[in-house]
Amino acid sequence: MFTRRRFLIILPAFTASAHAQSKWHLRKKKPVAPPPPLIVYIGTDTTKGVSKGIYQAHFDTTKGQLTPPTLAAATLRPSFFAVTPVGPGQRFLYAVNAINDPAATATTFAIDPKTAGLKQTGQVSSGGAGPAYISVDGTGHSAFVANYYGGTVASYRIQPDGTLSQPVDRIDFKDHQKFGALGPNSTRQDTPHPHCATISPDNRFLLVCDLGTDHITVFLIHPDTGQLTDPHTFTNGHPGSGPRHILFHPNGRWVYGLNEIDSTIDHYLWTATRFSDTPQGLLVNTNTPVKTIAPDFPADKNTAAELAVSADGLYLYASNRGDDSLVVFSIRPKDGKLTFLQRISCGGKTPRHFTLDPTTQWLLCGNQDSATITVFRRDAATGKLTGPTQTVPIDSPLFSLFI
């Protein structure tokens, strides 16, 4: 029974509780600060007479908004970048200057830790004409360049001041006994065309796609010296395909290769020997190529350009120049098999390169011949893209990189 005596006993406790709750409600919750914008570097085609080199922009991952790009460094046709690993010291950006001239170069820029501005600190020979790709090993001790027109791959030591040494090795892919015969497409495969120099996840091997011979060559890396040895060559089994780029799945066991000429993606199994005096990286073709273009789209009207895998390893993305589209595949977790999910317009013309932002909520697509970067929202649950949600003008974008 609720008596007067009981009421007088509980009244003070009730009053104290109400007072405490009112004070708690009056306290303002500390607002959660939004994540800071990310830095994006954009390489452009300076031979068109408008762009000047590398541009810098900020990307808001909450809103999916890219700021208007501003010039970060004037340099000739910077078509591909690599950066030194994150660490306590100064970071550097390396750009290849993609001109069809034996005197082509690779340029070093110091990254300002406060402003992300770029200052050129060195420039060396790329080791051949038309450098198309540069990579840096995970230790930050060596770098590698693929020269598309020169038919060579060059390796470098990264020196204590962050600059590249002169080429340590310069490997000529015109040695057909070692690197394979030319493919059947006489127009596109008239000579070797190394198009990428991709480093394996364990930093022990370099994989080079040669568009001219339809082969992928695996080298053993000596990161402290920058030397490359013990090449082994693998074929994708469909002549005239034109391997362009290759990437590793996050599990490190599957490799996907994009073929430029016939617009296909190959799936390989990767393994590497560990207990050996001469370790070897091995690619096994699963012989399950998929097309990046629709069955009724003429293959000779399209060239495949770029590919990426989501951080969760469940989706693969590729771009088509000619069809001017982005295509999405699901990756089957048990075996890595690709299944087509979506094809969507890139929102411009000639999507040479695209990149997923570090949160994987957004995709930025550089449309070389429509002078734009288009932003797409990515659904993490389905892998599909929507957009463009933003179109940002910039002349002749060739490459973009988040840091």
Image: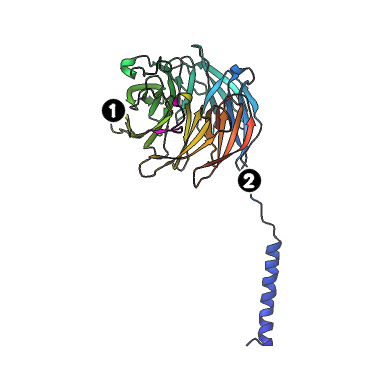
Callout 1 crowding tier (Cα within 10 Å): few <14, some 14–19, many ≥20: few
Asked if residue 87 shows in the view, the reply is: no
Q: Position of residue 351 (x, y in %)?
A: 54, 29
Q: Position of residue 156 (x, y in %)?
A: 45, 20
Can you say which quadrant of the picture contains the N terminus?
bottom right
Residue segment shown in magenta: 289-299
Callout 2 crowding tier (Cα within 10 Å): few <14, some 14–19, many ≥20: few
Q: Which residue is found at the position 31% from the left and 16% from the top?
A: 177
Main secondary structure found in the magenta portion: loop
Between 46 and 204, the one nearer to me in the picture: 46
What's the residue type where badge 1 is placed? Asp
Q: CA distance from mark 1 to mark 2?
A: 51 Å
The residue tagged with tag 1: helix, strand or loop?
Answer: loop
Residue at the farthest front position: 296
What's the residue type where badge 2 is placed? Pro
The residue tagged with tag 2: helix, strand or loop?
Answer: loop
Q: Position of residue 21 (x, y in %)?
A: 67, 67
Q: Which residue is found at the position 57% from the left and 27% from the top?
A: 349
Q: Tell me the residue that label 1 is attached to.
A: 277
Between 15 and 82, the one nearer to me in the picture: 82
Count of marks placed on residues:
2
Q: Tell me the residue that label 2 is attached to.
A: 34
Please tell me the numbered disc located at residue 180.
Answer: none
N-terminal of the pair, mark 1 or mark 2, is: 2
Taking the image as shown, residue 55 lies to the left or right of residue 228, namely: right
Check the image and tell me how it is coloured.
rainbow
Taking the image as shown, residue 18 lies to the left or right of residue 310, namely: right
